[in-house]
Amino acid sequence: MITKEQYLTSIKALNHRVFIQGETVDSIVDHPISRPPVMALAETYAQAEREDKKELYTARSHLTGEPINRFLHIQHGIDDLIAKISMLRDMGKQTACCFQRCAGTDCINAVYSTTCDIDREYGTPYYERFKEFLKYLQQYDLVPAACMTDAKGDRGRSPSQQVDKDQFLHIVEEKKGGIVVRGAKLHITGGVNSHELIVMPTRTLTEQDKDYAVAFAVPADTTGVTFIYGRQPSDTRRLEASQTDIGNLHYGGCEALVVFDDVFVPEERIFMKGEYPFAGRLVELFAANHRASYGGCKVGVGDVLIGATALIAEVQGTDKSSHVKDKIAEMIHLNETLHAGALASAVKGCRNPCGSYTVDHLAANSCKLNITRFPFEISRLAQDIAGGLLVTMPSLKDQQHTEIGGYIKKYFGGKAGVDSETRMRLLRLIENITLGTGAVSYLTESIHGAGSPQAQKIMITRLVDMDSAKAAAKNLCGI
């Protein structure tokens, strides 16, 4: 296992091609826009170093017997599933943003199980290949990014029916010792901060789509891979010299468009090549794991937002008001309901044929469907309690101005004994989580991350045992 500083050094050493606002970036660790997301991910290493957190953040590899970061662990029991959810909530509370490792963890667990299933059906060598790759990740304590979502083009057409075939990543050539792939993956969380990219199909496929049924891993700085950094609300505040109005002073999340322009993938890094019947199965397994994860990480961010809201009520002198106490109670109730759903999916988890464990799919999808709604209500209540100053106050920098600073300090202070800076900093944090760069992690990701609401509804209606429910109803009313 490596330290936080060793991780940052390793990311600096990557020779990957990254663009931010039309310019190439030499060091994402040092660029003001990309540094907060790097530091958020780096915290997953820092927490694993702490003696009081080791039980939560570390595990023992079932492949080597060595201690590893839990983010690289294959879950082999219900206790592992619960520990992962608990760890993600703790990380969300530490950073108040997307710390970018959930998808990679859920990805390696999904690919681990699916490659075993493919090998049993076709006699392929994918499972052993992936185990060797996993040993490599664990040995060097590397970060894998999950790359699933394709550009999709005309969504009314299958991959093979697209006018532009590159709208879904696919194999364009088979060469001695490997394959060449082309396409792009969108919304890739933490891709620029990862050492390895694991690519998976994005949907169920047919025989006509065989070339799109491909899963593999390549280093992030592989020739032909380009990262184009996604924009976020208020992200240019990080370019300001004062760094006072960004709300979350230390951390942030990030997404990127990852382009694969005729990238060569060596044979030993290929984990699916044309086995289209398993594409949908891999997607569903990853989605279930990841949807449960949201009941950890988003709840942790919710903890911070609830804490900031309780504090702003205190400094503004409204914390004793019955309606404020009622709203904060509702925020807590919604947040804990999300966590309960994730824990339920873990407790009801089941064993895969390969020996690993997966969350209960119905409970995981129900948890995620709630996550598409509840964080928005929690944010609404936070903004309600915070007041209109949340979006109308001037810059914190104005406090230092010789002419107008006195006005800011006089009129934006809270109750007796609370200065303007305390109140304004809390408001900026609430603004960040509900409106700014943090809202990408907390709100938009809550809707679309791990699949949009309709995806969960489709799975819920597919998974529920409606026949037994109907039979019970008939029995009770005498039909």
Image (spheres, rainbow, N blue to C red):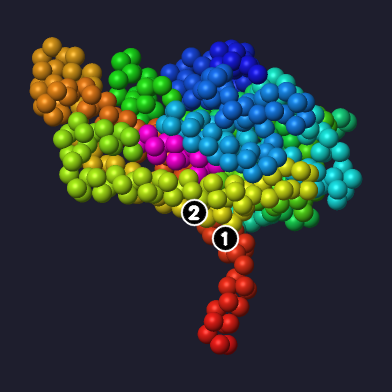
Is residue 150 something that shows in the picture? no
The residue at the point 74 percent across, 35 percent down is 216
Tell me residue 108's x, y (percent): 69, 36
Instruction: Check if mark 2's residue and mark 1's residue have beta carbons within 8 Å.
Output: yes
Q: Check disc 2: other Cα within 10 Å, few if <14, some if 14-19, many if 20+.
A: many
**Quick one: quadrant of the N terminus?**
top right
The residue at the point 75 percent across, 56 percent down is 206
**Quick one: quadrant of the C terminus?**
bottom right
Please name whichever residue, 267 or 318, is drawn nearer the observer in this view of the structure: 318
Judge from the rendering whether residue 299 lies leftward or rightward of residue 387; answer left or right. Answer: right
Residue type at mark 2 is Leu
Judge from the rendering whether residue 260 lies leftward or rightward of residue 300; answer left or right. Answer: right
Judge from the rendering whether residue 64 lies leftward or rightward of residue 306; answer left or right. Answer: right
Please name whichever residue, 372 or 148, is drawn nearer the observer in this view of the structure: 372
Tell me residue 77's x, y (percent): 68, 42
Residue 328: numbered disc: none
Instruction: Read off the residue under disc 2.
Output: 369
Residue type at mark 1 is Ile
| CA gap, disc 2 and disc 1 | 9 Å
The secondary structure making up most of the magenta span is: helix
Which contiguous range is marked in magenta? 293-305
The residue at the point 34 percent across, 46 percent down is 331
Q: Give SS at disc 2.
A: helix
Q: Is residue 17 above or below residue 301?
A: above
Tell me residue 184's x, y (percent): 63, 37
Instruction: Read off the residue under disc 1.
Output: 460
Tell me residue 320's x, y (percent): 18, 41
- Give yes or no for residue 295 being in the magenta stretch: yes
